[in-house]
Image (tube, rainbow, N blue to C red):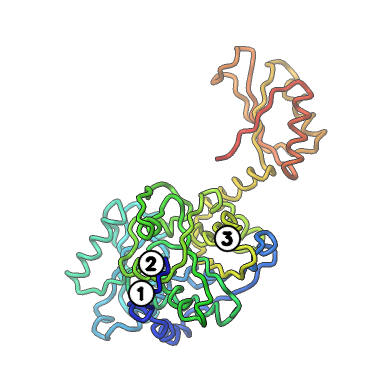
Amino acid sequence: MASLATSSESLPVTIDDVRAAHMRIRDSIVRTPTLISKTLSQLTGANVYLKFENLQFTAAYKERGALNTLLQLSDEAKARGVIAASAGNHAQGLAYHANRLGVPATIVMPKTTPIVKVTQTQGHGATVVLEGDTFDAAYAHARTMEASEGYTFVHPFDDPRVIAGQGTVALEMLEDVPGIDTFITPIGGGGLISGMATVAAAAPRRAVEVIGVQAELFPSMYNRIHHTDLPCAGDTLAEGIAVKEPGGITSRIVEALVDDILLVSERNLEEAVSLLLQIEKTVVEGAGAAGLAALMQHGDRFRGKTVGVVLCGGNIDTRLLANVLLRDLARSGRLARLRIRLKDQPGALYNVARIFDEQRVNIIEVYHQRVFTSLPAKGLIADIECEARDRGHLDRLMAALRDGGYEVNPVEPA
């Protein structure tokens, strides 16, 4: 990868395009900070700088490419309006800036789109059309409306104007921290990494390495570049980069300029979301945490490097975020469910609770099970959810229960 046989000058987006995009959009977007994380640097052995794109008004970098495209439309095209197919950050970024500029915007979403995303997009002034049960069906309908209504279609990633806008993220990072030698960037369709790689390629002596990150469940660009056929399916936390088919333009740029693509597990994505909230006190969606997930899962690859990680979005459902945080507490031993076999007699549960008290472990909830069990009729199962200080504290509790004659097993999270 990163074959220099294809020079950056022959690619559809140049550093001058990115610089021009920045001049256009810089007064209408948030100049998000690029800040060092001392704690994450200590944890990973790299010098970790975070770009907080989750602080954009719509909480994602997608505004940049959408705005750069809108500002280059003719007056006639602006009057007719724009259209996009998206159920995510691209929809909100395009809707927000189109409304601000007085450009009519139509967003086609699948009928299965959560109502909160529909209302948020409508709240930015867009007309939302619900069509089909899949993104592909919504996309096809948007292209049909483009032709019939004369709208301008704004692609979420496979457009040189969008790519140039997204590349402004890298321009700002290198202006703020010239010492960055590695970009770690999430890849969905490839718009963000294409823009960032264009900037990196123009750095003196090509001194900035560009590493892409995809979820293991959706390795579409990885497949395209490595000529593999790994499956692209599943419920990933990183829904913002769950793209089955990367762009044609972006694939060409990635193949020419990106140094490597890494895959990350769902467990590491969850851990990264949780760490960013605990350490940096910032809310990031699964796709936005993919860069940190790669830094943790492939630590040896980055040790000693000065890395720039883009927190590309912060739009995560609050119920999903709560679930991620609770699962992380369970994996760390601070939250547990213990399955304990008891005799069905008076005082059985009291005696177990007494051991919890002696070990100073807080009981959160108790579930008794007498009927749906393979135990004899006089046996029962008690599932006890509890809160400990750490894994060692929980292990001491289980040892005390076993010393008391109880059969106990933890119910492990996935």
Q: Say which element carries label 1.
A: loop
Residue 189 seen in this snapshot: yes
Give the farthest residue toward the right: 358
Where does residue 211 sit, x and y in percent of width and height?
Answer: 49, 65
Report the number of discs. Answer: 3
Q: Which residue is mark 3?
A: 301
**Left or right: where 155 falls relative to 89:** left
Residue 124 visible from this viewpoint: no
Q: Give the camera-side residue of 406 and 315.
A: 406
Q: Amino acid at mark 2?
A: Glu
Q: Answer yes or no: do the residues labelled 1 and 3 have beta carbons within 8 Å? A: no
Q: In this orientation, which residue lies closer to the viewer: 85 or 351?
A: 85
Amino acid at pointer 1: Thr
Question: Does residue 215 appear left or right of residue 35 in this picture?
Answer: left
The circle drawn on residue 6 is 1
Looking at marks 1 and 3 on the same chain, the residue that comes earlier in the sequence is marked by 1
Q: Label 2, label 3: how many angstroms apart (C-alpha)? A: 20 Å
Image quarter for residue 55? bottom right
* Residue at position x 56%, y 82% in the image: 175
Q: Amino acid at mark 3?
A: Arg
Residue 24, located in which quarter of the rendered image? Answer: bottom left
Q: Which of the two discs, 1 and 2, sits closer to the camera?
A: 1
Up the image or down, 247 lies above or below 337; here it is below
Residue 67: % across, % down: 39, 78
Q: Which residue is mark 2?
A: 255
- Percent position (x, y) of residue 134? 30, 53
Dots 1, 2 in contact, CB < 8 A: yes
Vertical position of residue 76 compared to residue 324: above or below: below
Going by the image, does 154 lie left or right of 97?
Answer: left
Label 1 Cα neighbours within 10 Å, binned few <14 / some 14-19 / many ≥20? some
